[in-house]
Every structure is written in structure tokens, then in C-alpha cells.
Amino acid sequence: MTNSARHPAAPTAVLALLGFGLAVAVVAVVGGLAAATSAQQYAGLVQPAWAPPPWLFGPVWTVLYVLIAVSGWLVWRRAGLASPAHVVYGIQLLLNMAWTPLFFGAGLRGLAFVEIVLLWITVGTTIALFARIDRQAAWLLVPYAAWVTFAGALNLAIWVLNRPG
């Protein structure tokens, strides 16, 4: 770990924060595009009584994506980008990005459930690794883990309720 990774200069830190924001925005855009094209299909699915209204997902994910970006940036400031924690962070971003096209775009709810379980494990691992570097960064991911837990339960319920036979 270099000294500059621990204490980056202000312009570098701002650019890095923008980079983390951009990475998370790409994940959000891919998910948003997949969800937007399937809104009517989703509305036609049998859903559990505890399913939130569709309008809630956008605001919740917006807040979560900001927390995810800031969390990654905080760890970058202390450990740099080459840390094992950031490798797992990157994997969870890719898994996050893949879930929406699986569930909404392709309608593969069973595969989406398996994928969200992997996402849940990876988010938990990211939290554990981040906690060793920056506790605040780890805590910023706790709402994300909670929402992924809820989303996994919702995914499972919708999959079960809409299976043929």
C-alpha cells in the first residue's frame, strides 16, 4: 500500500469518487433499462401481499447506489484499488448488474434467485473485507445487504407464485 493510496491528493480523491459513482451508475443504467422494458410483464405477475409498490424501487436503489459508491471510495482512500476487498466489490457490482436482466429482461426468475443468493454472499463478503479497512465503509453497505435480503425473498416468492403447474 502506497502512501498516496492512504492519503490521495484532493483532486485525485474527487476524480476517484466520480469514478466510483460512474461505475455504480453503469450498473444502475443496465438495471434500469432491463426493468423499464419489462414493467408491464412485471405488473402482470402474481406477487406476495408484502411486495412493495413498483415506484419504491427507484428511490431505494438510488440511495443504495450512492452508499455503494461512497463505500468503495472510502476503502480506496485507505487501501487503494488493488486490494482483495475491491476485487470482491467489483464482483458484487457485476452480480448486481446481472440480476435485473435475468429477472426482468429474460424472465428467468429461478436463475435470478440463484444469482441473487450469490450477490447476497458477495455483499456480505464485501462488508467483512471492508470492515477490516474502514468500518464506516462497511456500515454504509448494511442497508444494501438488507435490501438484497428482502429482494431475494421477493424474487423467491414471485418465482414460486408464478411457476406453471
Image: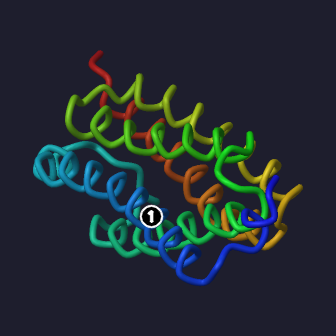
Where residue 104 sits, quadrant-wise, is top left
Which colouring convention does the figure follow?
Answer: rainbow
Residue closest to the eye, 52 or 94:
94
Q: Which quadrant of the rendered structure holds the C terminus?
A: top left
Asked if residue 130 is positioned above or below residue 78 in the image, the reply reads above
Asked if residue 8 is positioned above or below residue 79 in the image, the reply reads below
How many C-alpha atoms fall within 10 Å of the one at disc 1: few (<14), some, or many (≥20)? Answer: some
Is residue 44 found left or right of 53 in the rendered image? left
Is residue 110 found left or right of 16 in the rendered image? left
Provide the secondary structure element on which disc 1 rests: helix
Q: Residue furthest bottom?
A: 10
Q: Position of residue 58 (x, y in %)?
A: 33, 69
User: Residue visible at 45% across and 44% down?
Assistant: 96
Q: Position of residue 49 (x, y in %)?
A: 41, 57
Residue closest to the eye, 114 or 126:
126
User: Residue visible at 26% across and 56% down?
Assistant: 29
Q: Residue furthest top?
A: 165
User: Residue visible at 29% across and 50% down?
Assistant: 31
Q: Residue furthest right?
A: 132
Q: Which residue is mark 1?
A: 19
User: Residue visible at 31% across and 36% down?
Assistant: 103
Is residue 57 found left or right of 90 in the rendered image? left
Amino acid on which the number 1 mark rests in the picture: Gly
Total numbered labels placed on residues in the image = 1
Where residue 10 sits, quadrant-wise, is bottom right
Residue closest to the eye, 78 or 113:
78
Q: Position of residue 142 (x, y in %)?
A: 70, 63
